Amino acid sequence: MFKDPFDIDNYAQDPDHYLAVPFVPTEEDTVAAMLAMAGVGPKDRLYDLGCGDGRIVIAAARDRDAHGIGFDIDPMRIADAMEYAGWAGVEHMVDFIEEDLFSVDVREATVVSLYLLQSINVELRPRLLSQLKPGARIVSHAFDMGDWPADERIKVADGYIYKWTVPAPVAGRWDWTREDGTACRLELEQTYQQVTGRAWLGETEVSMSAELTGERLEIELQADDAAPVQRFILTFSDGALKSVVED
């Protein structure tokens, strides 16, 4: 008799292999919350690193019409995931690959899901930041990314889930000219999505606040407390400033 693949009790007698991360199935409600937090939709391509039985990838396809790929080093879990995808009727939208998660090329992903350990998340962090496009989302069950602060964190029944949006690299000097001919200059420093620095309107140095989300940098400039706030939206792509819109 075929067993429900998402019944955790089915795994009670199935010991884990000697893996870096033990297999612990994620509750269905938590899977749904992770997909909702990441805003997964039909245009997304989700990669699940350490996918286990594939339930996150399968739920993304079944419930949110998103294509996805699960990666796991355990061939038994890959076989389970492929079987469960067929059982759920989404085998045409998903794939499962036996591969070490540290060697996965994530460049094509728009969403990456994780249920690993904090130490593994931190070890993966440089690859995720260097390969994922700005605006890609990362969502993790239970474990954060060390000193990379999450954009969002919410409580679920079995812990917390965290979300990060991959930031564009914006550190450096950026210049543009306003319609009235005023030269603008920014000299920015960046730590993940946190941006600080100095700004000038013409020859006058002004105060600056900045908020970076993906490839979009929103800044507010003000010469002094009595002066009006000047708002700009800067868009970055491939390490270059692509557009500036005065809000």
Image: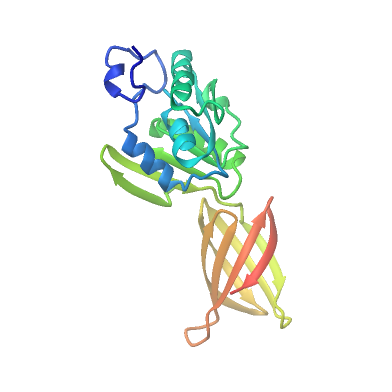
Residue drawn where x is 44% and y is 27% of the image: 88
Pinpoint residue 76: horizontal percent, then vertical percent: 44, 13
Left or right: residue 156 versus residue 172 is left
Looking at the image, residue 126 lies above or below residue 80:
below
Q: Dividing the image into 4 quarters, which one contains the C terminus?
A: bottom right
Looking at the image, residue 198 lies above or below residue 164:
below
The one of 229 and 224 positioned closer to us in this rendering? 229
Looking at the image, residue 93 lies above or below residue 188:
above
Identify the image quadrant of residue 68: top right
The one of 177 and 101 positioned closer to us in this rendering? 101
Number of numbered labels in the structure image? 0
- Pick out the residue farthest to the bottom: 226
Residue drawn where x is 41% and y is 39% of the image: 140
Residue drawn where x is 49% and y is 35% of the image: 61
Q: Dividing the image into 4 quarters, which one contains the N terminus?
A: top left
Left or right: residue 198 versus residue 122 is right
Residue drawn where x is 74% and y is 81% of the image: 181
Pinpoint residue 108: horizontal percent, then vertical percent: 62, 37
Color encoding of the figure: rainbow
Pinpoint residue 184: horizontal percent, then vertical percent: 67, 74
Does the rendering let one see residue 143? no
Looking at the image, residue 158 lies above or below residue 175:
above
Left or right: residue 94 versus residue 143 is right
Identify the image quadrant of residue 202: bottom right
Does the rendering let one see residue 137? yes
Pinpoint residue 54: horizontal percent, then vertical percent: 44, 26
The one of 118 and 213 positioned closer to us in this rendering? 213
